[in-house]
Amino acid sequence: MSGTRVTICCGVGGTGKTTTSAALALAYALAGQRVVVLTIDPARRLADALGIGTLDNMPRRVPLEGAAGTLDALMLDRAATWDEVVRRRATTETAERLLENRYYRAVSTRLTGSHEYMAVEKLHALASDGRYDHVIVDTPPTQHVVDFFRAPDRVRGILDRSMLRLLIDPGTSLRGVAARGALSIVERLAGERVMGEIREFFSLIGEMSSGFRERSEEVANLLRSGRTVYWLVTEADAPERNDLLGFLGELRERGMRFGGFLMNRVQSEVPLGMPASDVLERALEGLPAKDAALRALYELPERARTRAAGHARAARRLCTEGGAPVWTVPELAGGVRSLEGLAALTPHLPPAAEPSYRSGNAAWR
């Protein structure tokens, strides 16, 4: 894992974060890196952006003709990742018993912080895999991403052996007596068989708790590592500066490395893909409202320049307020629907090489 770099794309919903993650992954693959992009956003848009069929918990290769590197993609499946963790951490006998335990099946994906913790577990597994130079992560919307960073600490708390001991063996302490009383009531209500499975679940998980704590510390270190960089993705017409700056403050407070802002759908002075005036003239020849239509079309560049100026001001303001670089990514006519569309965005994204900028070297790009 020592050489694998991690890029984490964060932002509010609807800003093109998934498209940006896919475009970054493509850019790095075209630059010769072995890249994998992981989405933990359940909207399933990544497969469409990459032009492949479906995504699941295993990396799928994206066909890139003539590329110097490779690109894989996958989407987090909590249940499958939990099973992977159990098989990886437990002895064969313990893993088999736990995977067959009905209580494990019912609650493993419902534990507080489970989704986020499985995401960072998957990230750690990919970064440790040895097959990849770079892991790109497409996170859920910003308001949920903070849970992503807190997940290792939360799971450490939930799986603390001192908590589990009361359920596995209440003993004779005051707390133990209270726990025994509560458990006896639950056993009468739920039945001996159900309580047996619950006790077995906690007992087996308890055997793995030291491994969970160890791993969660490794994951927390990875999230704070200098090899991991965070980008905040926004949209030119609604930069949501307050949300972004609040989230940026949390990143900095936690000592996490911030690359900068990626501002999507920025208006260039002349809309990309707009035909020349003589082409418009020929296309409108013979139409009843030719003059009015032409006037409206001729006004498009001026409207585009006005919108572009507004986007430029928003980028400069975000750069100043955030004290970090802002990379502006143009809006493409018709949106991004294919690998070709993603490739058109790559020249406007941060380079695949190790970025030299830090939050103190703000520059509007």
Image (cartoon, rainbow, N blue to C red):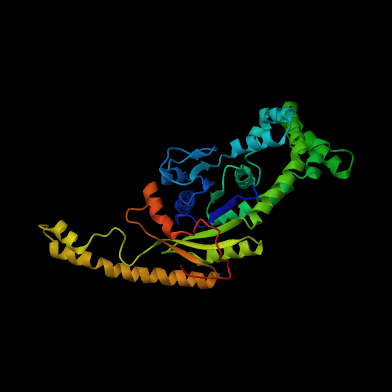
Task: State whether residue 137 is above or below residue 251.
Answer: above
Identify which residue is drawn at 13% across, 62% down.
290
Whole-percent x, y for residue 4 in the image: 60, 49
Q: Nearer the viewer, residue 67 or 206?
A: 67
Relative to 135, 213 lies left or right: right
Res. 261 in view = yes
Whole-percent x, y for residue 107 in the image: 65, 37
Task: State whether residue 19 is above or below residue 304.
Answer: above
Identify which residue is drawn at 80% across, 36% down.
168
Task: State whether residue 128 is above or below residue 310.
Answer: above
Q: Quadrant of residue 111?
A: top right
Res. 158 in view = no
Relative to 108, 244 lies left or right: left
Q: Nearer the viewer, residue 278 or 220?
A: 278
Q: Quadrant of residue 159?
A: top right
Relative to 318, 100 lies left or right: right
Q: Nearer the viewer, residue 327 or 66?
A: 66
Task: State whether residue 344 is above or below residue 307.
Answer: above
Whole-percent x, y for residue 182 in the image: 79, 38
Whole-percent x, y for residue 199 in the image: 76, 33
